[in-house]
Image (cartoon, rainbow, N blue to C red):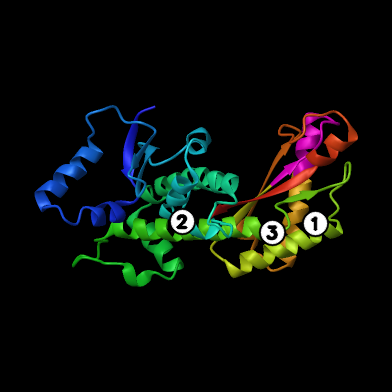
Amino acid sequence: MSKKILLLSSVIFLSSCGANSISELGDKFLDLINPSDAATEQADLGGDATLVAMDEDGGFTIDELEQLSNDELIAIAREKGLGDLIVLDADGNLQNRDQIINAIVESGDLLDGKTAELESLSDDALIEMINSKGMGDLIVLDADGNLANRDELIQALMDDAAAMLAIIENFKNSSDSFVLYFSYDDTEIDEASTRTIIEHANFMQDNPSVSLRLEGHADERGTREYNIALGERRGNAVSRYLVVQGVSIDAIEVVSFGEERPVNAGHDSASWSENRRVEIRYINY
């Protein structure tokens, strides 16, 4: 996989070179971004600034991130607007490494999709979205009424999406659950699921720009067609309860995977109980 080197701690680097001339500083920076040796996965600049390998599109894989130090993960998380997720102990050590890795990967996937979505919009649609976010004062039109700062508006929406992603990740960290479970061949919402639904309804009312997808699942018993329908009925049951709690139906999408995506591959009662579920996923913000 081709790589490019991203300087995450440029401020520290520049401050460390304060005694150099402008020419020398430029030469050192060029050496960093165009090294004579092949680029490595990581490079240590005296313990202060850190260089981290990144895909050309700015994304990471889990395997790549797992090779990084805690300090490098923290730097990437902050650069991606996920700093609020970082949990440190009294000695300043990272306590939630796995969560940070997953959040970085997810943010890359989601924000890449968000960028493509925004770039495909017409100017009018982009203006409408900016206005819906309460950022209409950013819009600049030329003398003919045409949008003059398209790139700036897309960046503003991307920044807003990144901030919302961090809020969602924090909610995941504090929420009781993002999964609702069901009895065999049943769609009834039990007490535990009721509490979870209310929690998510409150979150959506506090963050009206988000939408969610309810993914319905079933265990392996029954025909494929029946289980697809059962997963959909379970998703619709959760959807109806969210609407009762004040969530707009337009903010909810229901899909069913039936028995196709088990979380437990076993063939016993305990395994089946884990597979009869609806998963809540936030998809748009």
**Which quadrant is the N terminus positioned in?**
top left
Dot 2: element: helix
Which one is in front, 6 or 188?
A: 6
Q: At label 2, which amino acid type do we have?
A: Ala
Residue 225 is covered by the magenta coloring:
yes
Give left or right: position of 239 versus 35. Answer: right
Residue occupied by mark 1:
193
* Residue 68 vertical position relative to residue 170 in the rendered view, above or below: above
Precedes in sequence: disc 1 or disc 3: 3
Front of the two marks 1 and 3: 3
Residue 135 is covered by the magenta coloring:
no
How would you rate the neighbour count of disc 2 (Cα within 10 Å): few for under 14, some for 14-19, many for 20 or more?
Answer: many
Which one is in front, 28 or 164?
A: 28
The spot of residue 264 in percent (x, y) is: 77, 34
| Count of marks overlaid on the render | 3
Give left or right: position of 133 versus 271. Answer: left
Q: At label 1, which amino acid type do we have?
A: Ser
Q: Is residue 71 visible?
A: yes
Precedes in sequence: disc 2 or disc 1: 2
Dot 1: element: helix
Residue occupied by mark 3:
175
Front of the two marks 2 and 1: 2
Q: Is residue 285 visible?
A: no
